[in-house]
């Protein structure tokens, strides 16, 4: 049921040269108060400013023959990534954005050449409009996280880490809907444990693990714009369970402090959600032994206030 | 007179593991309208947010035995870099800051453990106070750019580029006082031409080339905070002349556009001066042939308004 190694590698072949191979930055653990080598994977330098470009383009390039376009409901990183991916592949994209999203996000989607439909209301209203559109047009819906091609696209980030960092002991990623987590964990399966880090106020994977299945939760806090899915994806839940990779939680203050450290000490301007895995390292929520190598994925930079 | 290859390599050995090996990001030239592979050297992720950390630490680690501290006049990147380097080496730093510098810069110098002396007036008054201090204390002055140890420290960035990017055809760097230019050009001598790029309104190297020697000019414009030295350094002038590497000029609008591109397309938040070499590529001021490889150094990120 979970994507095989071969599937992940075909995604990597499909995306080769079309997404950026994002760089890694080595920092001394003692700068962060941990006895390890810390490697930041600067995925915020990816096309569209987040890892979402990988899954979006993989989804677009995996469409059934004859599909003339894609659609999604999103006011955030997925919408921009899908707009970019569709433009890159030369097909149409219709993105349904809740009217609560800032105008800047709408402009960004349009800037990549997609049609942005502003839908009165919140995310559920936008999702309903997107479904109605897909029902009446020869286009395919691309889910923001819980779709096989999305997991396989995100996996290419994990395959890159394996090439860029030898002998990593931990890979820390943010977990919202879980596309990034499921992909990287599968890519690094049997090599390095991938730790899904959730904000306490967006802990949908922790809730799912407690309930034995994905459940709806209330979300909020500083990272809700990128990690605030009310339910974790089925792929992420299955990966967490089958590979025994439980989530680690951090509070909002720790996320803010980690984001500030990235800016002050590295001039890396991450969105709050993307600072979440570093927060788990800085607070000791992920325990590290002397001499270990920890990879921390900084997955996006699309919420650009300076901390 | 110019530093030898062996001197540059000793600087690299001295700094190994103490400055960051900053990452490179590959982008497609067609994203920038040029028929080349473009590699951004993300030196803004260096300690203290700019390449200045290299020269400052090399200077501090090259001090005569018994020196108890260093001093400088600076309200900018050099002051912060020297404060950091001195703290790193466990010696004192006294930085003389013109009262016209923003409080944030003063706080940053103090944040690295140095003593910041705010001097009523502009840069010349701060420089005079720094000289008086050095005359009456057992400390050494470290110049912001025109000093042998600074050039050799900056050269380590050039040596890194040679390791990170095979077969580069051009390396573009910003030129203010010329520490970065002189160091990288010497490091890459006989391998790749290094192009010093100057804002039209801070064109002290162009003026020096025209006059046959460094001359005082009036400076201004969007990049003056980091590139606005009124005179180019003697090392930079000698390197430009002896290695036949004349400056290329760009206007302020081009700098602003390049800075915006770095932010919008790469989530790299450069200071205006650090976007100057990319501006030379985007405007065609540096001509590139199909298939060439161009390295563009993004040298600092310490002027953090979002474009």
Image: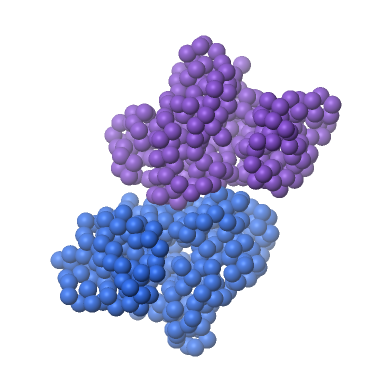
Chain colours: A purple, B blue
Q: Position of residue A59 (x, y in %)?
A: 69, 32
Along the viewing direction, whichever of A172 and A2 lies nearer the viewer: A172
Q: In the rendered view, would you say A180 is above or below B195? A: above
Name the residue furthest top.
A212
Quadrant of residue B32 in the image?
Answer: bottom right
Name the residue furthest left.
B66
The quarter in which the N terminus of chain A is drawn is top right
Q: Is residue A194 visible?
A: no
How many marks do you count on the picture?
0
Q: In the rendered view, would you say A293 is above or below B195? A: above
Residue at left offset 61%, top offset 51% = B265
Residue at left offset 31%, top offset 37% = A34
Q: Position of residue A73 (x, y in %)?
A: 70, 31
Q: Position of residue A45 (x, y in %)?
A: 55, 46
Q: Is residue A297 left or right of residue A234?
A: left
Q: In the rendered view, would you say A226 is above or below B126? A: above
Q: Is residue B133 left or right of residue A182?
A: left
Q: Is residue A204 visible?
A: yes
Residue at left offset 83%, top offset 29% = A138
Residue at left offset 30%, top offset 42% = A30
Name the residue furthest bottom.
B211
Along the viewing direction, whichever of B236 and A209 lies nearer the viewer: A209
Q: In the rendered view, would you say B23 is above or below A242? A: below
Q: Is residue A100 left or right of residue B108?
A: right
Q: Position of residue B155 (x, y in %)?
A: 40, 65
Quadrant of residue B9 in the image?
Answer: bottom left
């Amino acid at each position: 049921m979970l994507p095989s190694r071969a599937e992940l590698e075909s995604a990597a072949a499909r995306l080769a040269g079309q997404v950026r191979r994002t760089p890694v930055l080595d920092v001394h653990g003692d700068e962060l108060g941990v006895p390890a080598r810390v490697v930041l994977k600067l995925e915020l330098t990816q096309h569209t400013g987040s890892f979402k470009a990988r899954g979006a383009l993989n989804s677009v390039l995996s469409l059934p023959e004859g599909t003339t376009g894609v659609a999604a409901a999103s006011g955030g990183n997925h919408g921009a990534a899908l707009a970019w991916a569709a433009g890159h592949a030369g097909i149409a994209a219709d993105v349904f954005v809740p009217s609560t999203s800032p105008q800047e996000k709408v402009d960004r989607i349009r800037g990549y050449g997609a049609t942005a439909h502003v839908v009165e209301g919140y995310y559920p209203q936008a999702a309903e409009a997107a479904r109605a559109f897909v029902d009446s047009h020869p286009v395919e819906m691309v889910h923001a996280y819980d779709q096989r091609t999305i997991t396989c696209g995100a996996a290419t980030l994990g395959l890159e880490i394996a090439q860029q960092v030898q002998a990593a002991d931990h890979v820390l990623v943010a977990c919202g809907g879980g596309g990034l987590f499921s992909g990287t964990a599968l890519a690094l399966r049997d090599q390095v444990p991938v730790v899904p880090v959730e904000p306490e106020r967006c802990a949908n994977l922790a809730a799912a693990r407690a309930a034995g299945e994905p459940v709806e939760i209330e979300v909020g806090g500083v990272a809700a714009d990128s990690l605030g899915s009310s339910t974790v994806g089925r792929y992420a839940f299955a990966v967490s369970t089958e590979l025994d990779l439980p989530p680690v939680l951090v509070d909002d203050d720790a996320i803010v402090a980690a984001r500030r450290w990235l800016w002050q000490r590295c001039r890396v301007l991450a969105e709050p959600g993307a600072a979440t895995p570093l927060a788990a390292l800085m607070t000791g929520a992920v325990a590290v032994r002397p001499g270990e190598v920890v990879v921390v994925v900084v997955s996006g930079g699309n919420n650009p206030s300076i901390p």
